[in-house]
């Protein structure tokens, strides 16, 4: 892992990991941890799902382009 990545990249990475772990729990244990902690389709859970989705798209884009927030 690059320790010199910017805070935006680290936050996006954290959100992607949270999403991946949640999907792993859904697949293995049929347990949606976000829904369990925040409620099923509450505003809070929808915000988390939306942020994880945006983070996933941003990480996908970062595979092809440099992060504009990182100072090179």
Image (tube, rainbow, N blue to C red):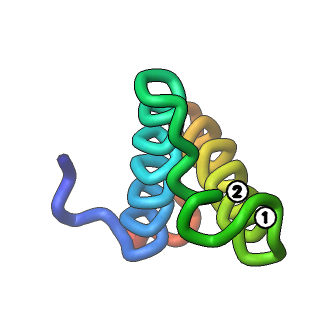
Picture residue at 51% right of the left edge, 53% below the top: 33
Q: Tell me: residue 66, above or below residue 61.
A: below
Q: Nearer the viewer, residue 17 or 61?
A: 17
Q: Where is residue 6 drawn, in percent x and y?
A: 37, 71
Picture residue at 57% right of the left edge, 60% below the top: 36
Q: Are dots 2 and 1 in contact, CB under 8 Å? A: yes
Instruction: For mark 2, give the secondary structure.
Output: helix
Q: Image quadrant of residue 59?
A: top right
Badge 2: few (under 14), some or many (20 or more) residues near its Cα, within 10 Å?
Answer: some
Does residue 13 appear left or right of residue 69 in this picture? left
Picture residue at 49% right of the left edge, 44% below the top: 22
Cα distance between the residues tagged 2 and 1? 5 Å
Q: Nearer the viewer, residue 44 or 69?
A: 44
Badge 1: few (under 14), some or many (20 or more) residues near its Cα, within 10 Å?
Answer: some
For the C terminus, the quadrant is bottom left
Q: Where is residue 11 drawn, in percent x and y?
A: 44, 68
Instruction: For mark 1, give the secondary structure.
Output: helix
Q: Tell me: residue 48, above or below residue 25.
A: below
Tally of numbered discs: 2
Q: Where does label 1 land, which residue?
A: 46
Picture residue at 57% right of the left edge, 32% below the top: 64
| Mark number displayed over residue 49 | 2
Q: Image quadrant of residue 41?
A: bottom right
Q: Where is residue 71 drawn, in percent x and y?
A: 40, 72
């Amino acid at each position: 892992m690059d320790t010199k990545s910017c805070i935006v990249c680290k936050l996006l990475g954290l959100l992607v990991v949270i999403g991946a772990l949640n999907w792993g729990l859904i697949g293995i244990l049929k347990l949606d941890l976000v829904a369990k902690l925040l409620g099923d389709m509450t505003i809070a859970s929808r915000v988390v799902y939306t942020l994880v989705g945006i983070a996933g798209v941003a990480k996908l884009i970062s595979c092809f382009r440099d992060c504009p927030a990182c100072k090179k």
